[in-house]
Image: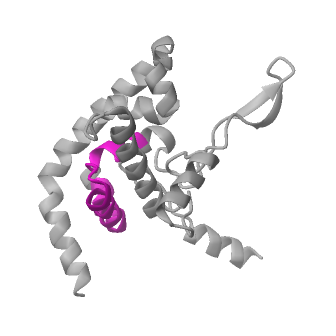
Amino acid sequence: MAAFSVLLAACTVTPPKDSSNLCAIFEEKPDWYDAADDMRERWGVPIHVPMAMMYQESSFKADALPPKDTIFFGLIPWGRVSSAYGYSQAKTLTWQDYVRETGNGWADRDDFEDAIDFMGWFIAKSHTINGVSKWDAYAQYLNYHEGWGGYRRGTYQRKAWLVKVSERVKSRSLRYASQLRGCEEELQKSWLWRLFT
């Protein structure tokens, strides 16, 4: 039993050591770069936007869960505040929409490749439904948090805390974009090297 626990722990994907630097993330986890590059090619979404959103949502933790709800004046934990789960903190119903529309029936919310593809799908739909640029991390995060209908109704305007969080996501995305410009050529070379070795 102890050996099984050790094996299970070894299989667990840990968050990147330096989540402040997109180059460091992808150098540590080259498969993540491959998945993010595939997402960009499939959905036309720049890598730095969903990566900044994912950091905000889960800090790159595969099994991230929302906080527990409470009852009786906040004294007793009672379930979770939402069905969000995994890297992207995708809610169950939205994830099911993604699976149905893409045919990706094997997708898992705690798999990075599936989670980044889900975020690319969502960002592309926000562009189609609400006309939000795929490069606009601020407005994309508001769509992600409030849903497409909520964004259209401007529900975020009554949530000063959410507007501040969206500004942080935007700042991180711009930093990630600048970092990626400086290392992507090397990341692509590494990808080719891995392909032929």
The spot of residue 178 in percent (x, y) is 17, 42
Q: Is residue 19 visible from the viewing direction of this image? A: no
Q: Residue at x 83, y 17 (%)?
A: 73
Give above or below for 10 relative to 101: below
Q: How is the image coloured?
A: one colour
The C terminus lies in quadrant = bottom left
The N terminus lies in quadrant = bottom right
Magenta segment includes 125: no
Q: Nearer the viewer, residue 154 or 117?
A: 154
Q: Residue at x 63, y 44 (%)?
A: 65
The spot of residue 130 in percent (x, y) is 37, 32
Pick out the residue farthest to the bottom.
197
> What range of the chain is rendered magenta?
24-53
Give above or below for 183 relative to 55: below
Name the chief secondary structure element in magenta: helix
Q: Nearer the viewer, residue 107 or 34?
A: 107
The spot of residue 188 in percent (x, y) is 18, 67
